[in-house]
Amino acid sequence: MTLHWTPLAHDGAARAGVLHTAHGTVETPVFMPVGTAGTVKAMTADAVRATGARMVLGNTYHLMLRPGAERVARLGGLHRFMDWRGPILTDSGGFQVMSLAGLRTMDEEGVTFRSHVDGAKHRLTPERSVEIQRLLGADVTMCFDECTPFPATEEQVATSMRLSMRWAKRSRAAYEAREGHGLFGIVQGGVHPALRAESVAALTEIGFEGYAVGGLAVGEGQAAMFATLDCTTPLLPQEAPRYLMGVGTPADILGAVRRGIDMFDCVIPTRSGRTARAYTSRGMLNLRNARHAEDPSPLDPACGCPACTRHSRAYLHHLIKAEEMLGPMLLTWHNIQYYQDLMRGLRIAICEGRLDEHAAALEAGWAPLREENDG
């Protein structure tokens, strides 16, 4: 049986379910920590597992450049290479390639680009992207697409989306079905409802094991993102998992879950941890702030991670100011733990039919604290 999703409960448009993969089951809604180059930055695999995370993301572009997909395959695949026993989703490399504006040229067949590592020339097509993800051993493979830039004219967005739909058809043709593995199509179309509907229709005609919503969280703002989800998610197949790519903050995730999204990934919790910012049940804290220098209280009394149970805000502030690597490590662990706890709470609330009440409590907790970086 291929990768599939089974529903457990609904609360409004929100869904709780289980994703079944070759490397185990994953309860949804789920947040996947980003392991770009075969590691979640500042974390061991055991530490990531300790947060409750069951699925992580790897990056096709970075892994094809270093150490190379063929090498990873020879060494037993990405799961063995990075000591991750659970499912892995790999993005297609499209976002990274498209961000290399001065280093790449694009045509109907694919993209030619120069590596940001050593300047070597590479060619990435839908077929090659799918092949790389197979060599890595991804449970979830993503179609190769063009991540449409923002802002762009409606005509530019339409041209880009239709190219991605042609590439999606080629990705499907190149994909080799395997037990417990699946291929996700990616909906594009910017913030234009008609183009999003056209993209969904094209992808569902091809048929995929899951569907991602791409091209958001690129500068359009939360209101536009939510409006786009409002017109897109209802069109997606009810029986398939839905993945919102590259999103986001806790508030973004809450809003997207309420609109029927099942899967998320984002660098925000790890990047924030490395820049002294911590997400908590009372909002975001900046541990660089001098107000924490003599604060003996825990980072978040509601959290069970090592940063919160073993250390004070004063100690974490000291580590950051002293530029000790333990500071970013502890804050990254905390942020991933917070995101996993957030998703667990959302799953329980959906199953118990009290998502509105739970969402109101979350938002009330986030509201009081608005910290600025005062050094």
Image (spheres, rainbow, N blue to C red):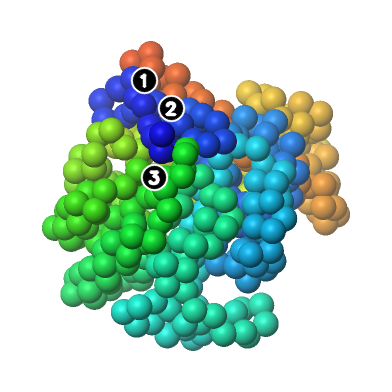
Q: CA distance from mark 3 to mark 2?
A: 13 Å
Kind of residue at badge 2: Val
* Residue ID at (67%, 34%): 49
User: Which comes sooner in the sequence, label 2 or label 1?
Assistant: 1
| Badge 3 vs badge 2, beta-carbon distance below 8 Å | no
Position of 171 with respect to 246 (left or right) is left
Q: Residue at x 41, y 34 (%)?
A: 1
| Type of amino acid under label 3 | Tyr
Q: Residue at x 39, y 61 (%)?
A: 174
- Residue 181 visible in image: yes
Q: Quadrant of residue 309?
A: top right
Q: Nearer the viewer, residue 48 or 126?
A: 126
Establish if 2 lies above or below 218: above
The residue beneath circle 2 is 18
Q: At numbered mark 2, what does the secondary structure look like: helix, strand or loop?
A: strand
User: In the image, is 62 to the left or to the right of 293?
Assistant: left
Q: Position of residue 375 (x, y in %)?
A: 71, 56
Chain-order first, disc 1 or disc 3: 1
Q: Disc 2 versus disc 1: distance between alpha carbons? A: 7 Å
Q: Residues within 10 Å of mark 2 (few under 14, many from 20)?
A: some
When the figure is inspected, residue 288 is found, relative to residue 191, above or below; the finding is above
Which numbered tag is attached to residue 243? 3
Q: Which mark is residue 154?
A: none
Label 1 Cα crowd, 10 Å radius (few <14 / some 14-19 / many 20+): some
Quarter where residue 135 is shown: bottom right
Mark 3: which secondary structure? strand
| Residue that numbered label 1 is attached to | 8
Q: Please rate how many residues cluster around mark 3, counting C-alpha atoms within 10 Å: few if below 14, some from 14 to 19, many from 20.
A: many
Q: Are marks 1 and 3 in contact (CB under 8 Å)?
A: no
CB within 8 Å, label 2 to label 1: yes
